[in-house]
Image (spheres, coloured by chain):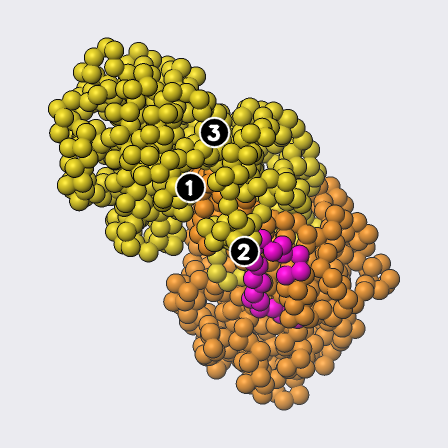
Chain colours: A orange, B yellow
Amino acid sequence: MSKALEHAQSQARAFRQQLHDFLRIPSVSTLPEQAGAVREAAEWLADNMRRAGIQNVAVMPTGGHPVVYGDWLNAGPDAPTVLIYGHYDVQPAQKSDGWHNDPFNPVERDGKLFARGSSDDKGQMFAHVKAVESVLQTEGRLPVNVKFMVEGEEEIGSPHLADFLRANRDRLAANVCIISDTAILSEEQPSIIYALRGLSALEIVVTGPQNDLHSGSFGGAVHNPVQALAEIVAQLHNPDGSIAVPGFYDDVLPLSDEERAELKKADISAEEWTRISGTPAPWGEPEYTILERIGGRPTLEINGMAGGFYGDGIKTVLPARALAKITCRLVANQQPQRIFEQIRDYVQQITPPTVRADVRYLGGGDPALVDIQTPAMQAAIRAYEKGWGQRPVFMREGGSIPIVADIQRELNVPVLLMGFGLNTDGAHGPNEHFTISMFHRGIDTSIHFLHEIVQES
Amino acid sequence: MSKALEHAQSQARAFRQQLHDFLRIPSVSTLPEQAGAVREAAEWLADNMRRAGIQNVAVMPTGGHPVVYGDWLNAGPDAPTVLIYGHYDVQPAQKSDGWHNDPFNPVERDGKLFARGSSDDKGQMFAHVKAVESVLQTEGRLPVNVKFMVEGEEEIGSPHLADFLRANRDRLAANVCIISDTAILSEEQPSIIYALRGLSALEIVVTGPQNDLHSGSFGGAVHNPVQALAEIVAQLHNPDGSIAVPGFYDDVLPLSDEERAELKKADISAEEWTRISGTPAPWGEPEYTILERIGGRPTLEINGMAGGFYGDGIKTVLPARALAKITCRLVANQQPQRIFEQIRDYVQQITPPTVRADVRYLGGGDPALVDIQTPAMQAAIRAYEKGWGQRPVFMREGGSIPIVADIQRELNVPVLLMGFGLNTDGAHGPNEHFTISMFHRGIDTSIHFLHEIVQES
């Protein structure tokens, strides 16, 4: 195994150059015009996996963007099988969003690699490919059977992956699934996520007059749809930051005292939080700590809002319509569709008769809780200790990987969330980056995991 | 005079074709990239005025877009001088806003001429040019002296016209100023505006985090700037539709009982209003009639709002910033700058410490009241009676022509608002149009006015 670690070290530069090539492909899954680039990223990854020694590599069709599959199954029937999940699609990005470099032209600076997808999730996922490559190149074999399943629709809610899992249950059968698509506590302090938030996405469209109107000829006697939408949106939260939608918290599995004690170990001060988030002050439910608000509590986020004229200058228009896009982060045991229905009913109820509101469901994913007692978790703890040099702490993650719940349900395997990123990586914003040393520590940790998991089986 | 009217009738088609050419020039004053088109519209108009027999035509520079000036001053020193104001610039428009035709490719359909600027104000203003042309071509002279002043910055608040008036007081000296840039009550019922609302324009920018954030990693512990802006905007009005900004109504000159009685003559039912505006129901201060809300009361209109992601699909972003653009319509004796300051102070006061709000003044114009007893008003009444076939009623206009207050103040002349449009013309929205018969009746009314005004002097 030391040879594999040495190999990874000697190939560090080459591995990063390959990652640069991967990041150059703008595989933005939400943009129809980038469908070709998404496909190109899948083909690139498949080719790289083949060169790494991974077998049976295939770009497998789905109802949307394809899944890249590959395996190495020569460890024997008694050895455990590890399924590695990741995604090769990325969020939209353009330089004008505030990037210092073209988001699809990777730049290394100050020990960081800047590019869209560097952390979420091309970089983190690629660490496992390079770990498997390092072991195969030096040991000629893996101590366990390994399967890769890398999808291209994670950033749009993985609409076709549950079907893919059902259709390929035998091919994907495994003893444990690992995912590296999360942040750890700090560069020096790894952490293991045992809970993920789910998602419920919707949009509200408020319409008033049939056309945009002259604000002088109509203003004062027509309810402005942008104003009406603002008035609706302002009623979605209570003054203390909790969500005002009736029934929203009904299904929430409360945090246990033990969990709250465990989460306190990793908690963060208000000062540190304002620094990390770049905000004037923390916000949110006062009876919960910052980490509890992110990991243990559901949210209702306004992802965007638009209506009327918002360019330079003045346009004295009374707009005909306004739009708000909303995603809720859910915790166990909330259900995406039910949450949507509660919001829809509440919005309809608070919409005055002077405008119309349409509320539309855009998709969702279940929240997930992972049993922290599973033996595979012990292997992960030791892998981090050896690969990272520090024992990990347990955390709840505020983000959503809807596929975790799907994999647990469809394949009946424990899912381990072994993050290699940081929540300061700018995952969905401008200047997303991946700390270069964490990419390499991730490869080392993955190499250790492939060996540690054997002893737990 | 009957020859002038006959001439206008015989040239109806040619006059409209000229107007089409004028409307084809996309003179959008707010868009820097259309500065060339604005200039082209000025030159086109100057050329058309010269062909009409108007003298001393010049495209005169200002600090921004030019003013087109022209006159005919051979009626003698005892004849009155009429100053005709209009504007050749237009609001932005693109087909994707919901137009049935290209907004700069005029189409005549169902007795209407569809194009941006057809009603506001190229078409209405052009009626006077064609009236003067018809009189000059048939009578060889005008009964009065006439001056034209047609500006190119009305849609951006006429930032350079007050300076222009001051610098050209002698050249512009007149006994009365007429403006056709307003709506009349209906196609068959002309009306004269004796009050105009002023304008105060501003924008609010709310910022929270330094960058867009991942809604999963930060949501629940960061105050979302789009949500915060919605919460601020929702506090600008009271539930009854009145404005919640402290002091906002302090300077409002109340409507007199006589005015309210006069305005009632032209008032409109809730059913008619919902039809005209295309809204589900009327809105606004319940203690005022619909026409009072529009003409006699100030407003605070959200012209637009934008922040975060509002495209198709889902983007789980927590945006860093959000913008709202606001224009207030003011009534006598409110002051634009003071209104801005009241809003700014209130917004700062209600902004929570979890975000920052910047409030910026974009410009404004004073409201105006015109004395309905002035003799020139009697000439206008008779001109409508003869040109339109119906005695006009008196109305307050909700729109703003800031220049009216400027002209009254700088040139010390009464300003008559002789509208030829309808408030269903879609002035600032898609499918703006001008009723063709009203264009021709406007020419006739202007011909009559040029003769009637002599008898009042």
Labels 2, 1: one chain: yes
- CA separation, marks 3 and 1? 15 Å
Name the foreground residue: A329 vs A218.
A218
* Tally of numbered discs: 3
Disc 2/disc 1 C-alpha distance (Å)? 22 Å
Residue B105 drawn at (x, y percent): 25, 49
Q: Can you say whether A368 is above or below A108 in the image?
A: below
Q: Residue B94 colored magenta?
A: no
Which of the 4 image quadrants contains residue B71?
Answer: top left
Type of the residue with mark 2: Pro
Residue B223 location in percent, x, y? 67, 47
Badge 3 density bin: few <14, some 14–19, many ≥20, Cα 10 Å:
many
Query: Residue B195 has which mark?
Result: 3
Chain ID at mark 1: B
Amino acid at pointer 3: Ala
**What residue is at 26 percent from the left and 30 percent from the top?**
B448
Q: Which of the marked residues, 3 or 1, is nearer the chain's N terminus? A: 1
Tell me the mark number nearer the camera, choosing from 2 and 1. 1
On whether residue A360 falls in the magenta region, the answer is: yes
Residue at left offset 37%, top offset 35% = B391
User: Where are the magenta residues, as a range?
Assistant: A348-366
| Res. A277 in view | no
Counting residues from the N terminus, which is met first, the one under dot 3 or under dot 2? Answer: 3
- Check the residue under mark 3 and report the chain it is in: B
Tag 3 near tag 2, CB within 8 Å? no
